[in-house]
Amino acid sequence: MSEIKNHQHALVTGGAGFIGSNLVDSLLASGWEVTVLDNFDPFYNPLLKRENISRHLDHPAYTLIEGDIRDTELLDQLGDFDVIVHLAAKAGVRPSIQNPTEYQDVNVKGTQNMLEFARKKQIQQFVFASSSSVYGISPNVPWRESDAVLQPISPYASTKVSGELLGHVYSHLYGIRFIGLRFFTVFGPRQRPDLAIHKFVENMIHQKSIPVYGDGSTRRDYTFVGDIVQGIVKAMHYQDSPYQVFNLANGSPVYLLDMIRHLEEELGIKALIDWLPEQPGDVPQTVADISLASQHLGYSPETSFREGVKKFSEWKNTLSRQPR
């Protein structure tokens, strides 16, 4: 597999967020020039994103552009790039049910805008953050990229399917190499505060109950953010075909009650559970077959769930000791 040489220029949309800022850490460390486009959406506290990028701002190879992927006039003013990593999106399954129109606007129209930008600038490499949610409630686990029928059950999931399909169109018509990466339940340092592991740890530390929807029998293929970054970087180098979708996961799903037990052991705190009804749009399980990414990207997750929880807890403890 031929590789894009370093010292090239990447545009990372959503590069101030959880996954994006971790990716930028890696790219800057390996010699990339990086431009980040981020609108600091208030879905969660934008100050957390400011903290994510605080170490990047003084780096000579880093440029931050505060703006929206729906702003085509802004996009027209951007320069040339070797690779686009498109992570920017409205996130969250449950909020998308409350506000489906905005999710369609940002995630589908915004992705269309980025693909148009790639076409106009003749940028040949486009990496897209998709999601395990595209598989919906398919019982045929582990989920494979070759599964013919996707069954999204939330507006958020449907926008990710749409993004993949748009990518196929632009790959076919304009020769843009499009790599869609279906992320499976990413966790680790800088994780969004609304996501389960972060929310649970926060509540447990402050002796608050944690919300558990359903009977606790759901399971997720939790993937450490460092492994996701590894997969993204490898996708930036991928040259084998003009269009490809890959699962990026750990490959070892964890039941919700086992996840809570791991957190209890790591924190030394007994969880207080608030049992709640199942939520619309939630899927009962996410289980990935990662053999395609292993074969074509050389993707190999290195961090177990238990090790990832330890790293997250260490980051959380460090954060709590910082002066406010």
Image (cartoon, rainbow, N blue to C red):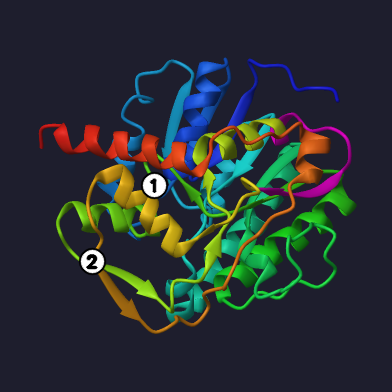
Mark 1 against mark 2, which lies toward the viewer?
Answer: 2
Q: Are marks 1 and 2 in contact (CB under 8 Å)?
A: no
Identify the residue at horizontal 82%, vertical 56% (top origin).
168
Q: Quadrant of the C terminus?
A: top left
Which quadrant of the structure image shows residue 134? bottom right
Q: Looking at this view, is 100 or 277 the one in front?
A: 277
Which quadrant of the structure image shows residue 156? bottom right
Where does the image place residue 4, in percent across and percent down from the top left? 75, 22
Residue 149 falls left or right of residue 310: right
Say which residue label 1 marks: 191
**Residue 166 in sight:** yes
Vertical comparison of 141 with 261: above or below: below
Instruction: Inspect the magenta stretch and tell me whether residue 240 lies in it.
Output: yes
Say which residue label 2 marks: 272
Distance, label 1 to label 2, CA atoms, is 22 Å
Q: What amino acid is labelled 1 in the image?
A: Gln
State the extent of the magenta-drawn residues as a range.
235-248
Identify the residue at horizontal 63%, vertical 15% (top origin).
7
